[in-house]
Amino acid sequence: MKDIYEIAVVHGDGIGPEVCAAAVEVVKAAFGPVNPLRFSEYPAGAEHFLKTGQSFPEPTFQACRAADAILHGAGGLPGVVHPDGTEAGLDFTLRLRFELDLYANIRPIRLFEGVPSPLSGVKAGDIDYIILRENSEGLYAARGSGALLRGEVAVDTLVQTRPGIERIVRKAFELARKSSGAPLDGVRRVTCCDKANVLRSYAFFRSVFDEVAKGYPDIATEHALVDAMAMHLVLKPGHFNVIVSENMFGDILSDLAAATVGGMGMAPSAEIGETNGFFQAAHGSAPDIAGKGIANPYGTILSAALMLDWLGHKHGDEKLSRAADRIRRVTKDCLAGGFLSADLKGSASTHKITHAVCNGLATVPG
């Protein structure tokens, strides 16, 4: 337990500063006058790249490495790219993932009361699972090391290792053990999502999954091919509890899953390793609505709650865990009470939602 936890805040681009500021305000409201978190702001992203030629300054990286946790708004702007065509705004996120070994990308998918789903007949409580994305290997680890030959052939390599697969699969089973099981049947279940019928790298992922699963006889297991999984998440989302996958597959599926629970504005994420933790909503920077005051802050607010959970567990600090629970309870009440942003078919501004959550925290006991 610590007296003060240092939080590195990187607002980023587009709506990033708006949603990040909302999350910080909510966390401060959760603790009141005795706040154990100290927030320090650092620059990074596409806007910073345009101004300085650097998307991720070294002082920002060192501050993030040293911090107890990192809270991020959003990164990237259309057309702001490196000579190879890759986005400059993503340098921040990807470097943190690989250099700080943030191997577990935890993306909760939950449908709240009051939030419309495009799926017919689905109501709050019917969708509640986690997509666990391996975050340090897979196809994305090839960024910066692929090859473009004479403008004719491009090559990126998908790499998966036994230690990398083993630790993400163990994390999946541990998350399932702590859960209440799948909404449809209450079964604690881990689903391995891969493309084992075509590629050796995914067949290897599946074989290691099966080996690790033997150590968790209390948890049900199953396999699903990624193309079929895209269908299952639409047709039977209540069946799933924890889904574990390679980096790119997890990225794609979590966006599809977010659409079933209200969209990317309702998609929090935690990216954690043995030492560091990085927390952001899974949405992009949405520059088309930046500055209009209509950005949905719920994803970043819920990401901040995940940050408090992680810090509380890591440091044995119950006050952080209690604050996380209160933020989630109040967020749930605000959504059910009609405080919906434009992307959720509502009219509440970013400020109005933030104010409602903060007011709710003032009345909910800690």
Image (tube, rainbow, N blue to C red):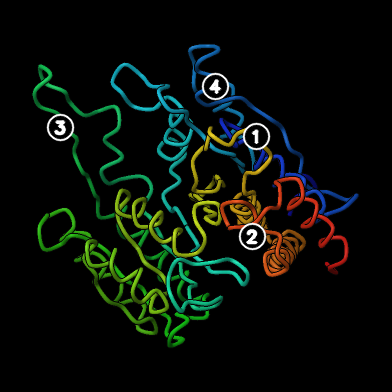
Name the residue carrying label 1: 17
- Residue 279 x %, y %: 57, 47
Sequence order check: which comes first, mark 2 or mark 3?
3
Q: Residue at x 47, y 36 (%)?
A: 93
Q: Which mark is residue 155?
A: 3
Dot 3 crowding, Cα within 10 Å, few <14, some 14–19, many 20+: few
Measure how far apart labels 4 and 3 are at the Cα level: 29 Å
**Badge 4 is on which residue?**
47
Please tell me whether mark 2 or mark 1 is closer to you in this view. 1
Determine the residue located farthest toward the top in the rendered image: 52
- Quadrant of residue 312 in the image? bottom right
Residue type at the position of mark 1 = Pro
Above or below, comparing residue 126 to residue 274 in the picture: below
Residue at 29% of width from left, 27% of height from top?
Answer: 144
Tag 2: amino acid: Asp
In the rendered structure, are the residues bearing label 1 and label 4 in contact, judged by CB atoms less than 8 Å apart?
A: no
**Figure label count:** 4
Q: Dot 1: within a 10 Å radius of its alpha carbon, few (fewer than 14), some, or many (20 or more) residues?
A: many
**Is 210 displayed left or right of 52 in the figure?**
left
Q: Is residue 4 depicted above or below 82 in this figure?
A: below
- The image quadrant that residue 189 belongs to is bottom left
Residue 110, image x, y percentages: 52, 67
**65 over 118 or under it: above or below:** above
> Tag 3: residue type?
Val
The secondary element bearing badge 1 is classed as helix
Give the distance between the C-alpha atoms of the residues marked 2 and 3, in whole angstroms: 40 Å
Residue under numbered circle 2? 309
Q: Is residue 246 left or right of residue 288?
A: left
First in sequence, mark 1 or 4: give its number: 1
* Residue visible at 61% across and 57% down in the picture: 306
Q: Nearer the viewer, mark 3 or mark 1?
A: 1
> Along the polypeptide, which appears first: circle 4 or circle 3?
4
